[in-house]
Amino acid sequence: MKNLIRGLALLGMLLLCCCSKTIYTHEQVLDMYQTKAAVSKKFGVPTERKAGDSTEAWLYQYQRNSHTVEETPNTKTVDVANFNRYDRYLIFTFDKNGNVIRNDFKGVNLEVKKKDTGRTILLVAGIVGATVGLIAITSSAVNNMNFYQ
């Protein structure tokens, strides 16, 4: 009985995770933000800011919360000569005109996924059909056995 419950739990997790499709990749999402104003509007106040002669870079720190990676809430930006080391971050580098010229990241995935209900229905129907088929074959085989030889 425990194996059946574990199997059903595993199957449920598989169904929840596998039937989605990627709408925008991480790189496509980052490419949507081409100006300092767009980055600020989407991501808010950066954790750290580093200014150079011809560029300015903003670092956004991310943290892992249970099963997701989320941006660390920030209300004040710290000006630094060199960025601190974080496990998860996103960096936008701007030119003097405020255009994004580069982005770097580590431990962050901004891809946009959408649940694919059609695939989910097909997968569930296939699993149910296979289970019913196996049960029918097994019961037919048991009924056809001759126990009184």
Image: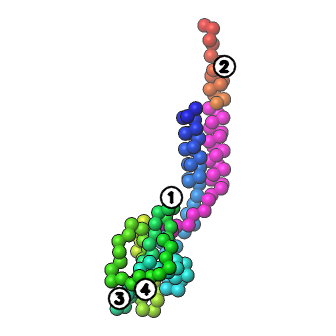
- Indicate which disc, 3 or 1, sits on the residue closer to the N terminus: 3
Can residue 101 be seen in this snapshot? no
Disc on res. 66: 1
**Which is closer to the viewer, label 4 or label 2?**
4
Question: In this view, which residue lies farthest toward the left?
Answer: 82
- Indicate which disc, 4 or 3, sits on the residue closer to the N terminus: 3
Q: Which residue is mark 2?
A: 143
Q: Amino acid at mark 4?
A: Phe
- Residue range highlighted in magenta: 108-134
Q: Are marks 3 and 1 in contact (CB under 8 Å)?
A: no
- Indicate which disc, 4 or 2, sits on the residue closer to the N terminus: 4
Q: Are marks 4 and 2 in contact (CB under 8 Å)?
A: no
Q: Which residue is mark 3?
A: 52
- Indicate which disc, 2 or 3, sits on the residue closer to the N terminus: 3
Q: CA distance from mark 4 to mark 1?
A: 33 Å
Task: Find residue 45 and report its horizontal and vertical position in percent.
Answer: 50, 80
Identity of the residue drawn at 62% across and 11% down: 147
Label 3: which secondary element: loop
Q: Amino acid at mark 2?
A: Asn
Q: CA distance from mark 2 to mark 3?
A: 82 Å
Identity of the residue drawn at 60% across and 62% down: 114
Label 2: which secondary element: helix
Q: Amino acid at mark 1?
A: Ser
Does residue 39 appear left or right of residue 129 in this picture?
left
Label 4: which secondary element: strand
Q: Which residue is mark 4?
A: 94
Q: Quadrant of the C terminus?
A: top right
Disc on res. 131: none
Task: Find residue 119 and report its horizontal and vertical position in percent.
Answer: 62, 53
Label 1: which secondary element: loop
